[in-house]
Amino acid sequence: MLIPNKIIRYCCLGLLSFFLILGWKALPSYSQLSSSTPSHTIPTISPIKPPRTSANSSALKINTSNNNNNAPTILPLITQNITDLEAEARQLYETGKLEQAVKLLKEGLTASSNRGDKISQVRIQRNLALVYHKQGNLTLGNEAIAASLNILNNEKNLGNTQEVTRLLAQTLEVQGELQLASGNGEAALETWKKTTENYQKIADITGITRSKINQSQALQTMGLYRQAIRTLTEVGNTLKAQPDSLVKAKGFQSLGEALRVVGILGESQNILQESLAIAEKLQVPDSIATSLISLGNVAYMQKESEAALKFYQRAGNEAVSPITQIQANLNQLKMLVEEDKNKDATVLAQKIESDLTKLPPNQTTIYSKINLAQSLIKLGNTDSVAKLLAKGIQEAQSIGDKRSESYATGSLGGLYEENKQWEEAKKLTEKALTLAQSSNATDIAYRWQWQLGRILRSQNNRKSAIASYTEAVKTLKSLRSDLVAVSSDVQFSFRETVEPVYRQLVSLVLEANPQGTKQEDLAKARETIESLQLAELDNFFRDACIDAKEAEIDQIDQKAAVFYPIILSDRIEVILALPGQPLRNYSTPLPQEQVNETLKSLRDAIVIPRLQLSIKNVLTPAKQIYDWLIRPVEGELAASGVTTLVFVPDGAIRNVPLAAMYDGKQYLVEKYNIAIAPGLQLIDPQPLVRQQLNILAFGLSEARQDFPPLPNVKLELENIQKELPGQILLDEAFTNANFQKAVESSPSPVVHLATHGEFSSDAENTFVLAWDKPIKAREFAQLLRNEEGNKSNPIELLVLSACQTAAGDNRAALGLAGVAVRAGARSTLASLWFVSDEATSLLMSKFYQELTTTQNTKAESLRQAQLSILQQKKFAHPYYWGAFILVGNWL
């Protein structure tokens, strides 16, 4: 049993961030859970998931029309002498008297069976399935649908073909509902595709639209948000020309929700407002509530907490359906908890718990219980948590939903883990993993593999723990396309629920060993950190289209050493790869906070004017970082004859100028060429082809869009053109449209942008500035990569000479790496902070001079340019030369 009086801080396995990253593969009609890790108290919650229902499930009203916007509904019993039964059943259904409705429908079924009326039998079985679904009795619902489909598929003389086709489509709609409610999004998707085909046969535009909306819901439950957006965009274009209807409102709401999940918040908000306006015009309370919840989620992600709370409160007041009201209240509860309004939160939690007891068991209510349990933990009310989760397990078993059972069982295992009851935690976690694997729920499985690894590690079973962690990482790799379905705000969740899996595996593999670390363990650690680098870039762009290829350092450059500095919770580890030598590692025991503080102090000392006054402010942390990363292998580096040091930086190391590391006498750049790689798997090892180099250059010298002028840009570009021939677009000639045309038509292997720009950990806030407007990261990268195939040659070198990483964002340099890799450029030269206009112009001129008049590599050319600046007294401070880094191919 759980120890009753011990405060349990575990937060239901961070299900909110997990579901945002992977997408719900479940009945999509409840809010998401918050993010946390087993070893921490509850962190800031991630955005809350809106209710998501299929296009018809929120409008199940008995209606005698065969083709209305709210289908599936209770269909009329056509046979004349059972009309009275049909009317009474409809009334009972509408008033929630479901058992009595079932009784009457069964009477109608008997009557139609006695008369041999197959069409009425099909309709009644379908209507029974709807009532059973509303009761939460999926088994009987599936039996009724199977009986209906059996008649439709096997009876040859059913009469009017068009009527039968419509009835088949409507029956398949309900089957999809049941499949989605059972957690089988894949089956629901295939069923709704068949529904669409049947509606197309009879040219039923409303039915086609509705079934495509349903398909998008299934796609979203499978984490395939971009496919869902494509489907919904097509539907939205069709709906715009149609009169307002519930189908139109639902279509817009679904599209807005999918856009929200992938972080396109402005468009999401606009289309959700359209959905709300239609629902209000039609005066449909639950449709209004659903749109309000989605708008609340958008507001939350925009960090407008007060607006989000108002949306949720209004949704709770508008909702008629009990489950929609619970969804709104769960989201509202999380907001209250986050804002420490514990008294109000406690009252609301009690209401939600009471309301949940009145609902039949289904996947929606099970997840709602897990959601509520998470909030109760935050409120310190742990007594009810185990009971809620145990009840969730019982209900999942009763409806045969292995996915829900896995969530609830694994969450309960997490509670035991936090309580240090290892054996109970292990048994529950293993059971949850088995359930997830048996239902092909790999998105759940990785969580339990990770949890099992932590438990085994706590039991000092290192070998089994490594095996479990390794399986978790393998599962994450297989989920790569799903993991990118995240919003900009979910990068916090990525760090809490995905990144730790990789880091904890590396930490475990590299734990101190008296016999020394084995080569196979070092190789595993390096491979794991490379995989993390790739996952971070996928997460940055929310698109798993970055190609990775295996690459060995010997195959790239026999004069280069590659460093993998890895920041772990209790130490900084370094893996070193020297050409022709075994891997080696060394570590410095330090808390992560101290490492990050030292890195920050170096950056601050360089870029904050008042700290620039004393060079000691720079040299002290620069020497400390040198002692961690370079000092232990100084002799080996010198003996190896390497000339280039390549760093695959981790975490906050990305934000500091590694060239400015200081050995006590000189900076690192005075001894070695320096390059940055987002991972050797992402390096194109081709050397620079120097014949016929030319340049395509863009620049802004005038003040634009609240950015200051760059008066030396014109001179910079003129000097560069002396070294490399090519085309220059300056100021008003550098528009978005002209940039696109020039990039598409020019064969230039070098693209140079002398303009303001900012790199952020959020792709939406990463941009370069053109004359008319900023060019966002995705658009910029797509233009340069030219995925349409118009550009025959890859970009050899991309130069961003006046950009900077976002202040206060300790992962901002991830944006720089993201743009560099996604643009398809073999090498990118950029700046970590905005540098003196004059110094930048001088450095760039020297860089191109070295590149065109010598056989130096790009890394050596940059080093010589930096040294030429460093040796000038007025530019000797690292502020002027340390910002420039070469990302990617250094040859």
Image (cartoon, helix red, strand yellow):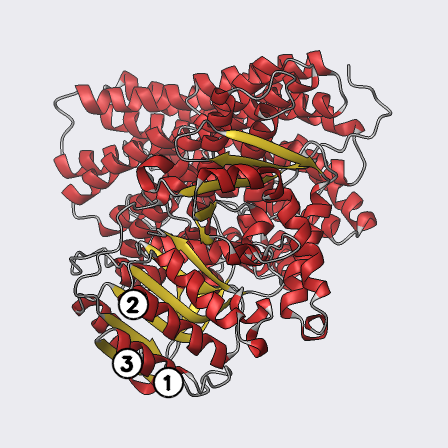
* Residue 877 quadrant: bottom right
Q: Position of residue 220 (x, y in %)?
A: 40, 42
Determine if residue 132 is in view: no
Q: Position of residue 55 (x, y in %)?
A: 39, 46
Q: Is residue 424 above or below residue 32?
A: above
Asked if labels 2 and 1 touch by Cβ distance under 8 angstroms, the answer is no
Amino acid under disc 2: Val
Amino acid under disc 3: Leu
Q: Nearer the viewer, mark 1 or mark 3?
A: 1
In the rendered view, does 782 fall on the left or right side of 435?
A: left
Query: Which of 837 and 5 lies nearest the eye of the viewer?
Result: 837
* Residue 375 quadrant: top right
Mark 3 highlights which residue? 729
Q: Position of residue 209 (x, y in %)?
A: 28, 50
Determine if residue 305 is in view: yes
Q: CA distance from mark 1 to mark 3?
A: 13 Å
In the rendered view, does 175 fall on the left or right side of 196?
A: right
**Sequence-first disc among 1 and 2:** 1
Q: Look at 41% across and 39% down and name the residue there.
A: 482
Mark 1 highlights which residue? 715
Q: Nearer the viewer, mark 1 or mark 2?
A: 1
Asked if labels 3 and 1 touch by Cβ distance under 8 angstroms, the answer is no
**Sequence-first disc among 1 and 3:** 1
Q: Which label was assigned to residue 841?
A: none
Callout 1: 10 Å neighbours few (<14), some, many (20+)?
A: some
Query: Which of 228 and 854 lies nearest the eye of the viewer?
Result: 854
Q: Is residue 355 above or below residue 383?
A: below
Amino acid under disc 1: Leu
